[in-house]
Image: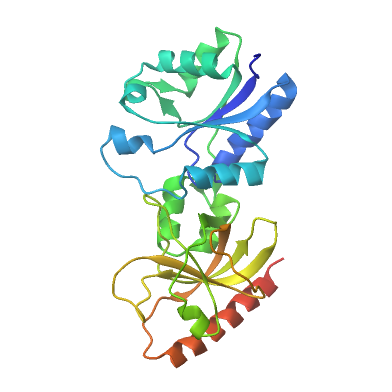
Amino acid sequence: MAQIRRALAMGFFDGVHLGHAALLERAKQLSARLGAVPSVLSFDIHPDNLVFNRETRLINDARGRKEIIQRCFEIDDIVFLHFNRRIMNMPWEEFADSIVEDLNVCSFVVGYDFTFGCRGEGNGEKLREYCASRGIACDIIAPVMLDGQIVSSTLIRQMIENGDIEQANRYLGHPHCLSDTVHSGYHIGRKLEAPTINMFFPDGVIVPRHGVYATKVALPEGKIYPAVTNIGVRPTFSNDGKVSVESHLLGYEGNLYGVPTRIDFYKFLRPEVKFESFEDLSVQIQSDVENAMAFFKQQP
């Protein structure tokens, strides 16, 4: 079977932010010029986890990154490599050879700080020289700046942890999001006449600052509902410390258990607090709904 030719953007793409967008758009441009398929190569886990033996908490897991790339950039050919010791210790030229051969690459696009191969000895300039000797196009994308700072996943992670979602979204170029299947919850929202859907952040993914957010919930058929989402440990009802994500969809009636759903985060409304009674919480939920709707009315 003939193999497709690929214009390949390589990187980890955590968050798929404005810097990553420059790579992805360039790969699409090259694919059109070269008659190739725009493609993405990433890793399932962050290389730092293995290289430095430390956990890097992510903006999105592999599923989330794939969903954003497909939805926002209309690139469907996305390849995830399992980052293991064999890949970590592979000489950079051998890694490049394997990618070119396995994926039939006719052009590469990488970021200015991209490294690969054993001890990170491969970089953009070495890849450019490698490609020049083989008749393969290679573009190195310069850093993207915003507010005088380089747009980076590290910076955006800090914003999300601090609950500064509006700023994080500026650097991402799209709303920070969570994709998950709706789980059965505690049904407390129904008692408060504010039924919620329950979701969870995957292991290894950053949990935003605990509190209430103005959000939108996207359902598989394409419908999007404004919502109020609480991230936290539900201190009014529980002391088990388990973090949950509970969203009250405004204007939706129905059962979403088992349905793959996406939450887009837009604004931090207030910190999570413990209420003395159901009545106090019910009043606050109504206030949260009003504040979320006021926020969305102000948006273009």
Split into 4 quadrants, where in the image is the C terminus?
Answer: bottom right
On the image, the x and y values in percent for residue 18 come to: 57, 45
Q: At 59% from the left edge and 34% from the top edge, which residue is drawn?
A: 23
Split into 4 quadrants, where in the image is the N terminus?
Answer: top right
| Residue nearer the viewer, 8 or 224 | 224
Residue 111 in the figure: left or right of residue 278: right
Picture layout, residue 234 above or below residue 159:
below
Residue 67 in the figure: left or right of residue 207: right
On the image, the x and y values in percent for residue 162 come to: 41, 63
Display coloring: rainbow
Q: At 45% from the left edge and 50% from the top edge, which residue is drawn?
A: 59
Q: At 62% from the left edge and 74% from the top edge, which residue is drawn?
A: 295
Q: At 61% from the left edge and 29% from the top edge, which residue is drawn?
A: 39
| Residue nearer the viewer, 145 or 101 | 101
Q: Residue furthest top?
A: 133
Picture layout, residue 282 above or below residue 113:
below
On the image, the x and y values in percent for residue 21 come to: 60, 41
Picture layout, residue 64 above or below residue 200:
above
| Residue nearer the viewer, 250 or 215 | 250
How many numbered marks have been drawn onto this rendered protein structure?
Answer: 0
On the image, the x and y values in percent for residue 105 come to: 59, 18
Residue 219 in the figure: left or right of residue 80: right
In which quadrant of the rendered view does residue 159 lie? bottom left
In which quadrant of the rendered view does residue 266 lie? bottom right
